[in-house]
Image (tube, helix red, strand yellow):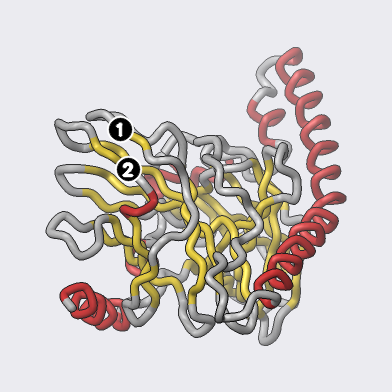
Amino acid sequence: MRIIVMALLLALAIGTAKAALLQGSDTNATVVLFGSTKMPVDDENSTQEILKVDVGLIGAENATYQLMDQNDVIYPAGLYKTLSSGKQTVYFLTEMDSLFKLMNVTPDGEAPIYINWWATPKASNDRLILRYYGIVDSSANSDEQAIVVQVRVQNNGTKDLLVSPENFTLLDQWGWPYQPTLGFDAEIVSPNNATSDRVLIGFTGISPASRPAALAYDYGTPNQLVIEFERDYVQLSDEVVYGTASKTGTTPVAASSTAVTQETASVQAESSTNQTDAAQTTDVAKNENTTSKINSIKEKVAASKAKLAATREDLDSKTPDTNETAGAPSSTLNNSSSASA
């Protein structure tokens, strides 16, 4: 009863929260980023994954998109899925576990619009720091949903911390709790250390009417931590993205020094002929690699969708009367390689 009451109270709080929409505009066009999710490439040995960004475009028919990660690596959009009323899904093929900081959107006939990305949500107390990296896989049919989320836990206390999937609870928009059905091997984390990698947690049997709204650690206890997705997804500051808070209009002052275009490396190296030649050679290699990625992303997306379709068929074949575990999302729940958090 206590957990149900807490869930209902949390639902009231979540119901009043608003999504942290990211927006940028110039004199004619406006771009809105509503959210993003990831899906695995259908290759267990791949070091890449697919990022899907929900985008709204107003005042322009089309635009080109580039995404920059924390290492100033640029990913051009490889595929667009047109929806309705100016909405579209933009696909990027990125390195696995990348953290992003900037989106460059160039509407047709307009100047580039730069939008700072979302910061990684986190929650903490005197025992631990919880970081949430988002939904990395999902599947659904007419009866239920299944999702996989990625997190990392750091020991913020003075005693060893046992971390296991059972520590986590997923809450929907009404505050209804779901327990994990798939996950990682339990791990003992010593003080001032974190889980050896980001870890994956799977939730199945989620109502098709439910929308994942929060992730809790030790839910229903005095030490619980709750990350509310809409509330805790905030925009990165200019200091983090550019190293300075100064921006003018829609064009950041630091944009010319943050490698927003593929030619930046050679521009910065113009002081030396040898350095310029080396940078240009590197740019050619990057461009060839980018072309290869764009040419393959359609096949990778199609393969991933086919795998999800097979999962849905498996779910459909199981009746509600069985005790079998509901079909899981397409990823295998092994620990993924970690980027610096």
Residue 200 rendering spot, x and y as whole percentages: 49, 49
- In this rendering, position of residue 62 left or right of residue 31: right
Work out whether residue 160 can be spotted.
yes
Q: Quadrant of the C terminus?
A: top left
Q: Residues within 10 Å of mark 2 (few under 14, many from 20)?
A: many
Give residue 39's quadrant in the image. Answer: bottom right
Relative to 253, does residue 7 appear above or below in the rendering?
Answer: below
Looking at the rendered structure, the kind of residue marked 2 is Val
| Residue at screen point 28% across, 80% down | 11
Residue ranking furthest to the front: 322
- In terms of secondary structure, where does tag 2 sit? strand
Q: Residues within 10 Å of mark 1 (few under 14, many from 20)?
A: some
Mark number, residue 189: 1
Residue 281 rendering spot, x and y as whole percentages: 81, 24
Tag 1–tag 2 contact (CB < 8 Å): yes
Work out whether residue 116 can be spotted.
no
| Residue at screen point 75% across, 45% down | 43
Observer-nearest of 143 and 56: 143
| Residue at screen point 30% across, 38% down | 154
- In this rendering, position of residue 29 left or right of residue 178: right
Observer-nearest of 88 and 262: 88
Observer-nearest of 326 and 210: 326
Reading the image, the residue beneath label 2 is 163
Residue 145 rendering spot, x and y as whole percentages: 56, 73
Looking at the rendered structure, the kind of residue marked 1 is Val
Relative to 205, does residue 304 appear above or below in the rendering?
Answer: above
* Mark before the other along the chain sequence, 1 or 2: 2
Relative to 237, does residue 34 appear above or below in the rendering?
Answer: below
Separation of residues labelled 1 and 2 (CA atoms): 7 Å
Residue 123 rendering spot, x and y as whole percentages: 27, 53
Observer-nearest of 65 and 112: 65
